[in-house]
Amino acid sequence: MTDGNSEIMMAVKSGRAIRFSEIKARATGRGAIGVAGIEVDDNDDEVVGMICVNAGVGESKTVLVVSEKGYGKRTAVDEYRFTNRGGKGVKTINVTPKTGKLVGMLEVSEKEDLVITCKSGVTIRMRVADISEQGRATQGVKLIKLDEGDEIAAITKIEDQAVVAENGNTSENGDNGNGNESGNGAIEGPENATTE
């Protein structure tokens, strides 16, 4: 949720992102079409993620982006210049045939975990802290080895197990905190995350 003074970031499949003030998006009725947030390239381009950034709050948070073919990275919010809504934005990941299109964007902290779900149904979990922080215009690192023809379908973040344990909400069924058995209880890192 926003607080009226937040910053909004939106990303599109073609690998661009925009950052603008919430006050630039005026309040409209429930049935209204709304206002333009970011310009898309063509009919195949679309918005794949939106996050709310509160200035001065959560200084340790970074922007995480992930592409169709398993590449991802974290980037500091300050690397995205502040602009008006409705523009083309700036490059957030270097989209190539090797990386595939952008599939998602999240605001994350190093105390959280990332869950990646593939179109084949395979799901893995890894620590956000294990994903390297890089510049905006880079392609990122390989987060998961995909089978031929498979792609990333969705990403989400969840609270780190250690943080949950400190709050007294430990899991009793031996799963990894998201309802999926992890086999040996380990959380995958980018270097050993596979779909095999």
Image: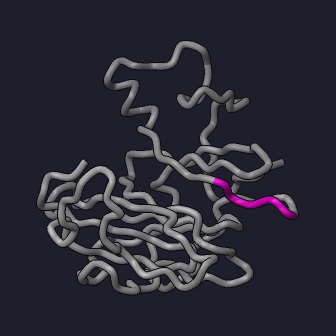
Relative to the observer, which residue lies in front, 113 or 82? 82
Q: Is residue 75 left or right of residue 114?
A: left
Relative to the observer, which residue lies in front, 125 or 55? 55
Can you give x and y, in whole percent of width and height, for residue 184 in the image? 70, 30
Q: Which residue is outermost to the front?
A: 31
Q: Residue at x 18, y 66 (%)?
A: 26
Q: Quadrant of residue 160?
A: top left
Q: Is residue 167 left or right of residue 195?
A: left
Q: How are the colours assigned in the image?
A: one colour
Q: Residue at x 35, y 63 (%)?
A: 33
Q: Is residue 155 left or right of residue 195?
A: left
Q: Is residue 8 left or right of residue 16?
A: left
Q: Is residue 151 magenta?
A: yes
Label count reads 0
Q: Is residue 55 magenta?
A: no
Relative to the observer, which residue lies in front, 100 or 5? 5
Can you give x and y, in whole percent of width and height, for residue 174 in the image? 61, 19
Can you give x and y, in whole percent of width and height, for residue 95 in the image? 61, 82
Q: Residue at x 27, y 76 (%)?
A: 78
Q: Residue at x 46, y 84 (%)?
A: 91
Residue numbers of the magenta segment: 149-153
Q: Which residue is outermost to the right?
A: 148
- The relative height of residue 146 versus residue 76 in the rendered view (above or below) is above
Q: Main secondary structure of the magenta part?
A: loop
Can you give x and y, in whole percent of width and height, for residue 127 in the image? 51, 49
